[in-house]
Amino acid sequence: TLVVTTQYVGEAEECDQVALIADGRLIALATPDDLRRQASGGEVVEIETTGVFDARALQAIPSVRSVRQPGPRQLWVVTEDAGAATPAIVEAVTQAGGEVASAREYRPTFDEVFAELVQRQAAAESAGVPGDAGGSRTPSAT
């Protein structure tokens, strides 16, 4: 066993298991991929359309957990499995009258993951909710 400590969050992505500690408290312990899923709520498919598109049309897809629309032609679709869901998402955009310019899995940087989990923990603590940002303090099976 080798324990690595670092202030450079991106380096932690190379480890088998990562413990995120903020203010001296363990807020998450999991594999880097599991931490990414915890921070985003699943895997994210980023869709860019050729024209303005209303993302609400995608919420009816069974594999879709949530949809965010950061811009009129940009959609972030959270699913359990980005690879399996992408064809259904592209088809749904087409069926709703849109045209997909690009579709790809979006992998947030580990800096983004760390920031999201720390912010979530801070929000939970300010609301008086006990527990950690990652939802579990036990490592996931790999």
Image (cartoon, rainbow, N blue to C red):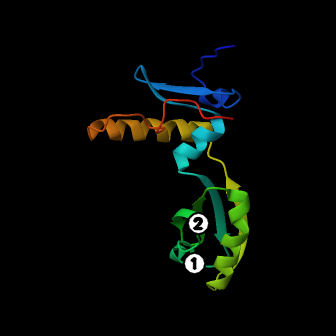
Q: From the top left corner, tell me how far across and down residue 94 is, in percent.
A: 68, 81
Q: From the top left corner, tell me how far across and down residue 40 is, in percent.
A: 54, 49
Dot 2: element: strand
Above or below: residue 128 compared with residue 21: below
> What residue sits 62% from the left and 46% below the top?
108
- Which residue bears the numbered disc 2? 75
Above or below: residue 60 compared with residue 7: below
Q: Are marks 2 and 1 in contact (CB under 8 Å)?
A: yes
- Characterize the local packing of mark 1: few (<14), some (14-19) or many (20 or more) Cα atoms within 10 angstroms: many
> What residue sits 71% from the left and 29% below the top?
14
> What residue sits 69% from the left and 56% below the top?
105
- Which residue bears the numbered disc 1? 53
Inspect the image, locate mark 1, and give the three-letter code of the amino acid beneath it: Phe
The quarter of the image holding the N terminus is top right
Residue 140 or residue 86, whichever sits in front: 140
The quarter of the image holding the C terminus is top right
> What residue sits 49% from the left and 30% below the top?
137
The residues tagged by marks 2 and 1 sit, at their Cα atoms, a distance apart of 9 Å
Q: From the top left corner, tell me how far across and down residue 107 is, in percent.
A: 66, 48
Inspect the image, locate mark 2, and give the three-letter code of the amino acid beneath it: Leu
Above or below: residue 141 compared with residue 25: below
Q: From the top left corner, tell me how far across and down residue 32 is, in percent.
A: 64, 35
